[in-house]
Amino acid sequence: MKKEPSAMRGMLWMILISILLFWLPFFGPLIAGFVGGKKAGSVGSAILAVFLPAILIGIFLFFFGTVLSGIPGLGFVAGLGGFMLALTGIGPLLIGAIIGGALAE
């Protein structure tokens, strides 16, 4: 019985494989993106699975920074910094996800 592809499954696979293959500088995220893209089932879902964790981390850091400091402006800067930091490692992951999503269709 085959499971239905979804962006959430692809995202979880990308996170798990990225953690396991952290020691491969370019090929680790590329492989993680490829597998996650195949699990996502389409290119659109694969792209969503790549960017959704970065967006969620940025939102979490915004609220967490605001709660800790009590200053919404500081929370915004912390969230934006976390979002940009999360986006720095997305290049090979995105390439792999697009290839995996295209092959899954």
Image (cartoon, grey):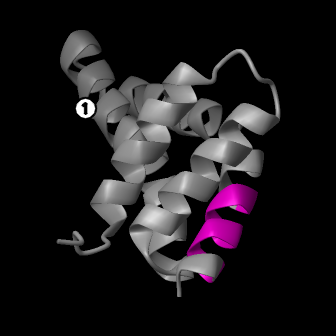
Instruction: Identify the residue shown where x is 43% and y is 49%.
Output: 55
- Residue 37 location (% of width, % of height): 53, 64
* Magenta-span inclusion, residue 75: no
Q: Residue furthest bottom?
A: 105
Residue at x-position 59% and y-position 44%? 32
Q: Which residue lies at the image location 62% right of the left edge and 62% below the top edge?
A: 97
**SS of the residue under disc 1:** helix
Q: Magenta segment range?
A: 95-102
Q: Is residue 89 visible?
A: no
Amino acid type of the residue that numbered disc 1 sits on in the rendered structure: Phe
- Quarter of the rendering containing residue 15: top left
Q: Name the residue rendered at 42%, 63% in the picture.
A: 39
Q: Nearer the viewer, residue 77 or 25?
A: 25
Task: Let me know if residue 100 is in the magenta part.
Answer: yes
Q: Position of residue 21 (x, y in %)?
A: 62, 24
Q: Is residue 59 left or right of residue 83?
A: left
Residue 23 visible, this angle: yes
Picture layout, residue 51 above or below residue 37? above
Residue 7 vs 62, above or below: the answer is below
Judge left or right: residue 89 versus residue 9: right
State the residue in front, 47 or 24.
24
Q: Mark 1 highlights which residue? A: 63
Residue with the most extreme right position = 26
- Count the labels in the image: 1
Mark 1 closeness class: few <14, some 14–19, many ≥20 residues within 10 Å = some
The quadrant of the image that shows the N terminus is: bottom left
Task: Report x, y in % for residue 103.
Answer: 63, 79
Q: Main secondary structure of the magenta part?
A: helix
Residue 74 in percent (x, y) is at 42, 24
